[in-house]
Amino acid sequence: MKGIEGLKAWQAAIQEQRDPDATWIAVCAGTGCLSQGAADLAAALREALIRHSLEGKVEVKETGCRGFCEQGPLIVIHPEGIFYPQLKAADAERIVSETILRKQVIEDLLYQDPVTGRRHIHEGDIPFYQKQMRLVCRLNGVIDPTHIGDYIVHGGYQAAAKALFEMEPVQIVEEIKRSGLRGRGGGGFPAGVKWESCRNAHGEPKYVICNADAGDPGAFMDRSLLEGNPHSIIEGMIIGAYAIGSHEGYVYVRNEYPLAVRNLQTAIERAEAHNLLGDNILESGFDFHLKINRGGGAFVCGESTALMASIEGRVGEPRAKYVHTVESGLWNKPTNLNNVETWANVPLVIEHGADWFSAIGTETSKGTKVFSLVGHVNNTGLVEVPMGITLREVMFDIGGGVRGGRHFKAVQTGGPSGGTIIVDTTGAARPAEDRDEHERGPALVPESLIDLPVDFESLTEAGSMMGSGGMIVMDETTCMVDVARYFLNFLTEESCGKCTPCREGIRNMLAILERICDGRGQEGDIDLLQEMSDTVADTSLCALGGTAPNPVLSTIRYFRPEYEAHIRDRRCPAGVCTALIEYSINATKCTGCHACFKACPTDAISGEVKAAHVISTAKCVKCGSCLDVCKFDAVVKQ
Amino acid sequence: MPTLTIDGQTVEVEEGKTILEAAEQLGIEIPTLCHHPLLEAYGACRICTVEMQRGKRVRMVTACNHPAQEGIEVQTRSPRVLRHRRMIVELELGRCADLPVLRKLADDLGIDRSRFGTGEHECILCGLCVRTCWELVGARAISFANRGTDREVTTPYHEFSDACIGCGACVAICPTGVLKMEDIKGRKVIHSELTLGPQRAIRIPFMQAVPNAPFIDPDECAHFTTGECKVCAKVCPRDAVDHQMEDQFEEIEVGTILVATGHDVIDCSEMLRYGYGLYDNVITGLEFEKLSHATSPTGGKILMSNGEPPKSVAILHCIGSRDENYKEYCSRVCCMYSLKFAHLVREKTGAEVYELYIDMRSAGKGYEEFYKRNLEEDVVFIRGKGSEITTWPEAPGEEGKLVVKCEDTLLGTVRRLPVDMVILSPALQARADAAKVAQTFGLGCSRDGFFLEQHPKLGPVQTASDGIFIAGTCQGPKDIPDSVAQGAAAAANILSLVDRGSVVIEPITSVVEETTCGGCRLCISVCPYDAARFDEEKKVSVVDEAVCKGCGTCVAVCPSGAAQQRFFADTEIMAEIDGLLAEIGDRHQFPA
Amino acid sequence: MSKPKLALYWAASCGGCEISVLEVNEAILDVADFFDIVFWPVGLDFKYHHVEAMADGEVLLCMFNGAIRNEEQQHIAKLLRRKCQVMVAHGACACWGGIPALGNVANREEIFDRAYFTAPSVDNAEKTLPQTSTRVAEGELKLPVFFDTVYALDQVVPVEYYMPGCPPVVDQTVAVVQTVMSGDLPPAGSVVGAGSKTVCEECPREKHDEKKVKRFRRLHLCDDLDPTKCLLEQGVVCAGPATRSGCGGKCVSVNMPCRGCYGPAAGVTDQGTKLIAALAAVIDSTDPDEVQQIVDTIDDPLGYAYRFGMSSSSLRRVRTHG
Amino acid sequence: MAQFEPRIVAFLCRWCSYTGADLAGTSRLKYPPNVLPIRVMCSGRVDPTFVVNAFRKGADGVLICGCHPGDCHYNEGNYNMMRRFPLVRKLLAQFGVEPERVRLEWVSASEGDRYAEVVAEFTDEIRKLGPLEWAPMMAPPPVQTAESVVTAK
Amino acid sequence: MDIATLDKLCDRYAHERGAIVELLQTIQTEEHYLPRDALERVSANLDIPLSQLYGLATFYRAFSLKPVGKHQVLCCTGTACHVRGAKRVVDHFRRVLGIEIGETTEDGLFSLHTVNCLGACAVAPVAVIDGVCHGEMTAANVEKLVRQYRSRSGE
């Protein structure tokens, strides 16, 4: 197949075969939905179609993640676009018989807005989607990632063809620079500038790498992009390689994402089969080979030099970046490394042009960003929003507010390297005047933080950072000291152990925090933590160590009272630190239903059926099982 | 050439230098733990972090690997740098035991105790050993294992790695000394080379070696086993190290040769009853000399193998000499050096010394007086050859001692001497390759293997072959004065030959009578020196007088009698025969 | 003055030398012209008393061939010595004992025992032996005494010239006679009719510097001999190197190894030991046992060494009565 | 009659045997005087003619001494003697001379005692063999009176 | 894995630069752990020092030197799961299986690991057993799952 004409011809050929108004069902098969039974649902639908002898006419297509994981497993019936969320296998029969056959909308299956209670038929009018601008994720949930035709029919690879045939490499770099596209990995370094310096660095061969390690816990946008639309990343890398003058690329994927690896591998094979990858792409004379490199399972390998060490078959140990990797990266050759989402944006910029792209987002942060909205929020899922949208819109308008009607306490962005932005409606936060000069983070903690625009500069200013896009909503049941302890515990396990400040610093800070959580905190612990944080942040070799203190510093900054409660009063206001809480049964409310007796793993609960039960504090390991099963709110935790 | 300022002082350095090197150039000291000039900068310990201002941005960077760029301002002791440095040392102390290298840093920075307690690790994970093994030596036997706080240096599966070539480089470079060099090659230190600790691959053989220059021992040198290293070549300021050099064999033409190949000492381990090689403290005279010598590893102190000075020493003479089963001759030198040893032991350690001798042969100048001096220094002389050494105690006071059994012929009793150390005086014997050397130089060998002089009285340094001389113990056991005298004699002989200018050739040669030679060429066939050649025109054999050595074999073989030997012609020998048998007068004469 | 007188006598020999005199063909006429042959038992009927009747030294030249085996030959030798001026030992037998001298390996008793008793063709039951004098009807028969040892001519009477050869080659005989006729006589005791070198000089075969053999071979057993190469180098015992030249290499030119009939080379007293030395020199071994094996392949060293020179050999005869 | 004192001619190679004999002398070793040494440059020089001639001139035994194989000053001289010796012995045997009467021994320069030993042993052996008495063999033919010869009338 | 397949594997990766981790991954998925003789064989075939392979095997969480259990229990301790009580689920698994994180039960059936994030935050806290994802885990259904897998492997 040769050039753009060949591509367009192929696209037209596929369109002909497709009847635009044929009905077909898109079942979301992202990991989130799969883990809630999407596979069984799809099977049930197919059986139902067979029963109604519709198998030839109506097609069931398993697509990538549509973003609304909370409402999984969900389907969209085309061409009408009817959206049925939270389905069970049993609903398949009704869907086929009523909606498919008789085009009737099943009222009770429709999405009901938890706040307004209104039911919405089409995806578009659900608030979760209204405020979003799904560009990178537009094909997620629309195409079958394993079937290249779906991608081609939606204009796939035409941006690459345009770049290869109609644009010069320098032109492409200029276009990306003008577009203001910045790295989506967390650093936010302008992609264009990076490409330019890599292009100008001397040394052959040059490499392009896609960092699909996505090590940040709680951030799975890279994963759903790889699963849902791998071809967009391949196309982005082809354009990037052509611009920089590289013929060899690697995608470094986490080993814990088997579905992503499989779909990407299939995509590469299909692309090579159709002369869209490999030698002489589209007869353009440009060769580009892409190989998958499964990571060994190390968060540190998210850092560029550690990632390259891992590809080179060495242990994931970062090295000083005084000489940038664009000049001397993989095997000491010029290497350009970008995040999955960054590569996915590239075809958009080339297809619609830099001006179109730079129109989206704020003055300094252009384009959209995919966030993974998780934690104590109603609508957990992947949210792609234009830069500059406010926190309020993301968390409340899209996110549907805090779960279970609780109070919103904090949101954490940037993963372990990020900080916690406080939109404290509980008033527990502290005015900024009395913070001392070497403290980090924003000068002010106004109520209006909730209206903080989400972009690189403002998030960093707020003491956190964009990071890969994890946004973890926390309500008042979350103990901030425990959050800090969790992050440090994670970082102690994931530190490569090469440099002293990171290996020893974080370990000792964790020890202090665990002491505090155990109720053995001492005066001066907080100052010691801050002193240590200062050294760890300044002298650590790589970003892992460098940003590790952020969660601690930002929680201290805004929740010093909670720390002091743990240290002075040996109390955990949020009731999380097990050493400081106690479980007891409110005799008046307890109906003696014996449920908690059966649930307790260490049979710390005694009492006869129908009589009030008692918890023996000695045996109780505070697992909280009794609280879970008690229907009468008799179990009290303070 | 970038110029930068460090602590206010400006300095200009070559391209590619680091801040640390620039600081060294200014004599500013920046502490390092994981850095070594021969290794690539690693940046693990971070103790060398300094404050660097470039343009308006101030950043904390590690000096060991940050390039010295144009126009940067570096502060090596700013409050912020010191604060970080103190915290890092405190963190290290929290992890490791009170290691000297850390204690020194802590004292410099004024830290007495770490707020993070004290750990028990002795390895500060600086990685110097791993990087040396990988980058320098090339054996690649050890590496880092695990991750984060469990990180450790180890060989695969914590077992002995057969990639390790035991070069000891990691031990040498480890700042904390946690790596120890087990004597894994099982070398017996006191006996074989008397060197303690790992054998340097490049070393001066011994103190007074001439030339007093180091040599590379190919078996020990890592380069020859792994193809890497060459550290010595890198650090040598005069580029004198060349690993490509090969042994060269030079062939030189000489007029005269002086063979002075010396002697060997009998292997005492063959005589099982003395337990040499079995018991640690039974050593030979040569080994005692090495031990008591000022340049010995013990610095001349006389110590037993366990490092203690001996309280009692027995010196046994004639081990293998004057002995039918081994060497019948007297080795001539042992008595006197044994006396020297006795004197040394008495003087240096004051230990009880027993000398077991058959006859005290102190025949040299001043020798007898030295023997008398030993007597005065209470050395115990027992006239009787040491017969056996055992560690089997039979009487009290013999536990843990070497018991020397001997017969004291003056007292007429058999005695048992419990001592701490025994010195054997082994017999001198011809070198193992003496026979081969003799054949090469056409030397005769006496039955005991020493080379044969031309005449015991008239030609002690000459040999049967003209122009080849011998001197020293290769001709027979003798001590240093005699050897020196022989050396001088041989040299004098050689010089007399050299300046004579011409060589006297053998007068006794063969000559062929042209008129009677039939050209049968038998003489040519037998001549060992190819002195006889066939003259094609005259069809006769001709003898080249310069080449002919005068053995006369051709004359005996010449069937036509044409070949005759001057001074030993057939007629002359026949006349000798007649003369010898003359009395019986059977002259062949005509009948009356 | 009448022609010089010539005397020829045939003692213990095969008579070949006498015949070789005839071989001079027409040259015999020159001899007849120059000489007055006065004693030639085989050619002309002369008797002993004719010779006894002559004056001492009357005969110029006496060509005495044959060794002295018995008393009669000794007597005639002495007689002729007295009667002639120049005594020439004509032929190998006269010079060194020749083939008859091989009898010295035994003594008279052993010879008679072999000849008259044990020889396969003898039928002598009565064991009669010839006696020096036997009475027969016709009277007393006398036989000369049979010596134990065969002696060369010069061991009985002094000899002026020795003419080697068995028989001497024709042209050598002619040359000798002509020299005598010319009166230009070489010094007494010298060997005439022969060269001054050895047979090797006249031998056409190629000789090489390297002479090494692993074993000696009997001629009649060899079928692979190289006609151009020296026989000794091929392991065949050839007395050429130890034998005086003069014969022109007659035998070696026809693939026959030289047997040494021209006697020892000039200046050599014992031809046999010289040949032994030569044979030993070509043995190719340094190991005593292997040398012994090679020596064992020479079956009869005495036979090769003293085929023609037993009488004048160093030890002359074998010691039989020990 | 006094004990038969054999007369033994010895050919001693100048480098080894002759020096060995000399050493025997300087070492004051006792050995029978029956040996009459002749110095030759090398045992290779000893011509079979000398051996045969010695017996002819009345020697009762002939001893030839040379350097040990490999030690010869001229590299191969003694090897040549070694090759001649068995042939000379065989020739002498054919002449009726007991082969034991001729002997080849390797005596090096330092083996003074060995030389004395060889001489003593060889002399004993020849004494047992008794005198060679080769003179009768060399006697001229028996002289007969002229008349006893003339017979015919 | 027998020698032949291992060698074939090595040949396939021999010329490909940067494939060592891939190779170890393949062995790990095949054998569920990295046997010592396999590492020694790879070291010999590809001329890579054994110390480097040992470093890789002990650094990356995906590899283990000891045989792991038949059923792999992966508990997600990502931030989302953490705030929804992942820690209690992990503690419960530890109590029920009687092993610590990273160990394998004596009967070799179960091995327990924690993972940073499995990408199913919507149904946090999550546990994946043999690739099958179980969302909204509570202490209760931990025991149910363990019994279910133990019986299934019992057949």
Image (cartoon, helix red, strand yellow):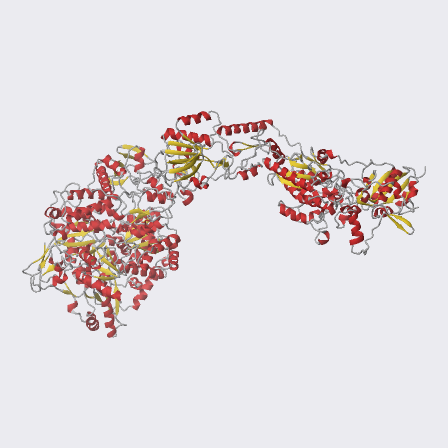
- Look at the picture and state if A516 lies above or below E74: above
Query: Going by the image, does E17 lie left or right of C26?
Result: left
- Look at the picture and state if A619 lies above or below A83: above
The x, y position of residue B136, in whole percent, is 37, 42
Q: Quadrant of the N terminus of chain A?
A: bottom left
Query: Going by the image, does B70 lie left or right of D84?
Result: left
Q: Quadrant of the C terminus of chain A?
A: bottom left
Q: Of residues A630 and B360, which is closer to you in this image?
A: B360
- Look at the picture and state if B429 lies above or below C212: above
Residue A72 seen in the figure:
no
Q: Of residues B203 and E24, which is closer to you in this image?
A: B203
Q: Residue furthest left?
A: A588
Residue B393 seen in the figure:
yes
Quadrant in which residue D36 is drawn: top right
Q: Residue furthest front?
A: D1
Q: How many marks?
A: 0
The x, y position of residue C310, in whole percent, is 77, 44
The x, y position of residue B69, in whole percent, is 30, 38
Q: Of residues A78 and A251, which is closer to you in this image?
A: A251
Query: Going by the image, does B345 lie left or right of B87?
Result: right
Query: Going by the image, does A158 lie left or right of A511?
Result: right
Q: Residue furthest right?
A: C1
Q: Of residues B230 and D115, which is closer to you in this image?
A: D115
The x, y position of residue B61, in whole percent, is 26, 41
